[in-house]
Amino acid sequence: MNEQEHYNESDIQVLEGLEAVRKRPGMYIGTTDVKGLHHLVWEIVDNSIDEALAGYCDNIEIVINKDNSITVKDNGRGIPVGKHPKTGLSTVETVYTVLHAGGKFGGGGYKVSGGLHGVGASVVNALSKWTTVTVYKDGQIHEAKFKNGGKIEQPLTVIGDCEKERTGTTVTFKPDPEIFDTDIYDYETLKVRTRELAFLNKGLKLTLRDDRDEEDTQGDTFHYEGGISEYVRFINQGKTPIHEDIIHLEGEKDGVFFEVAMQYNTSYNSNIYSFVNNINTHDGGTHEEGVKRALTRVINNYARKAGILKEKDESLTGDDVKEGITMIISCKHPNPQFEGQTKGRLGNSEVRKLADSVFADGFENFLLENPEDARLIINKAMLASRARNAAKRAREITRKSEINQTTFFGKLSDCKSKDPKVSEIFIVEGDSAGGSAKKGRDSMTQAILPLRGKILNVEKARLDRALGNEEIRTIITAFGTGIGEDFNLDKLRYDKIIIMTDADVDGSHIRVLLLTLFYRFFKPIVEAGHVYAAQPPLYRIMHGKTRKYVLNDEEKDKYLASLKEGTKTEVARMKGLGEMDAEELNETTMDIEKRVLRKITVEDCMAADAIFEKLMGDEVEPRREFIVENAGYATNIDI
Ligand code: 1YM
């Protein structure tokens, strides 16, 4: 009788606990939308992963069943089946019905479950219509069943025998549709995280299968002996690495395990992802800080010692050495402290030192043993540094220009009007065309900025170099918007920015450079539709005393066909802007009434940007060919 009463009491407590979860599911799993639905899977899988981290499990299967219930199966030791001293229930029932029970039972090891929300198996059970737990252990199959939010339907019972060697836990649960907005699982969502878990836990085999799909009988199996190295390789697919080997370093201290894998590619972005106990630390933390600090220090030390970075050169910054890096940082910690609003930051201060020393030692060795790779890595960081400084200079110049405009306008012949709504600027290729344009313009509303082609040669011109270019600096000043952090579209001094270049290779060069410049630094100007290409005529047709300019062959043929025969007709192909006199230029290309402009879109700029990147190679001939073959979009501007 006494025992019966006791059982009832704890039974009531248990039910109250699970009821609390059902009342406020958000507190335990964040949300009850599709995200929360998927969260349930990881709560169960986490228990299997813990078992893998403890060294007893190397195979996990996840199945979406036909009825949108989920089965998770592992080959670990199996949840203990004995009676639990405190609850009087079997351990399996305790783990699945007592809130926060999971963590208290495990002896040592890393507990990944309970990371973000401190929840576990009992929460999944509380939010499920039904749950079945099967344990294979000591030659027997044990089963417990729960229904309606974790009420015990069938206490743990031996339901059969199995081979003595067979051990493991299988859990099937059906999320309660009364709790969740949706009960349909998304295969892709589960796949991405399953793959990630395989990368983060090397050697562990994870299989995901969709039994709703009649054709998918195999599912996807993820198994990476290389762990996070293979994660880096995966992310860098489709990018161009600048060194062959992925750098993979690891170390351990006082039960804290730390590892990092990285490889540089030719892009300008960095992909750095960090994890603690398989949980993504979006906001970084001590593990990330340790690595970044060491990365910057080691590269600078090496570059100085090797004489690549001279005494007069300023040190490379964290941003410089990060350019083009793909890096995965993974830390397994027995007692992680998650900080910040979203608990996405690791706070344990001892990890900073561990991460720093593991990374610094290993990375320095890598550089010493691979001097060729070291040179490529450092060169990349130095180019990033130059680009950063150039952008800074350009910003400073535009700032200064507000103080003393005339000094910084260079060759700009500005218009008299200060009203941006009626003002326009022609960026003109070459001094001679610039001269004609200046004479032929309406000086009230039209500003002329001539560019000298040679200076704008894109050979090896990275944007930092471009920004070191005086004329480009003048462009920035003339626009008045500033650049980078200071950019302000409202300050644009012209309503129309008109690129006026020839339809030849050199003209393409300049266009590609300008469009790239606009795309990277003045995108809002392009988006707002302020950038245009002038369309100088391709032919001049004299018919008796009448003169006619046409933009392309089609127009020429049409015009010629319409002419009266007998009168003398002369067709001249216009070679370039430079050969037109002021009057001609005005009449054909600049006069607001007669000219034809083509609006430049962001897509035009993107295409130019892609070409620009290809142009960065060292060999001249393929580059020249490339321009001639691919600058078609740019020549179209002139059609
Ligand atoms: C499909 C879900 O839960 N596997 C699992 C869970 C446990 C163990 C093994 C386990 C842990 C320990 C000892 C230990 C859990 N046991 C407990 C508790 N798969 C799944 N596999 N023996 C077995 O941590 O010492 C909680 S989870 F608390 F009962 F030990």
Image (cartoon, rainbow, N blue to C red):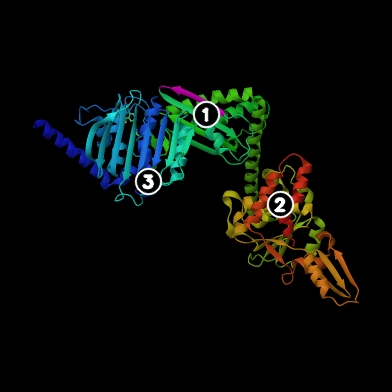
Task: Identify which amino acid the numbered label 3 is placed on.
Answer: Lys
The dot on residue 226 is 1
Front in this rendered view, residue 510 or 419: 510
Front residue of 265/238: it is 238
Placement of 477 over or under 288, stated as above or below: below
| Residue located at (39% from left, 31% from top) | 49
Amino acid, disc 1: Gly
Residues in magenta, as a range: 247-254
Q: Secondary structure at mark 2?
A: helix
Q: Nearer the viewer, mark 3 or mark 1?
A: 3
- Residue 112 visible somewhere in the drawing: no
Q: CA distance from mark 2 to mark 1?
A: 42 Å
Between marks 3 and 1, how big is the CA–CA gap? 34 Å
* 2 and 1 marks in contact (CB < 8 Å): no
Residue 565's spot in the image, x, y percent? 88, 76
Q: Report the side of 160 relative to 416 (left or right).
A: left
- Up/down of 249 relative to 487, above or below: above
Checking the image for residue 512, the label placed there is: 2
Q: For residue 498, what is the image quadrant? A: bottom right
Amino acid type for the residue under numbered disc 2: Val
Main SS class of the magenta portion in the image: strand
Residue 219, image x and y in percent? 46, 40
* Ligand 1: quadrant of the figure: top left
- Residue at the far left: name it: 1
Mark nearer the N terminus (3 vs 2)? 3
* Cα gap from disc 3 to disc 2, whole angstroms: 55 Å
- Tag shown at residue 66: 3
Q: Residue at x 77, y 54 (%)?
A: 507
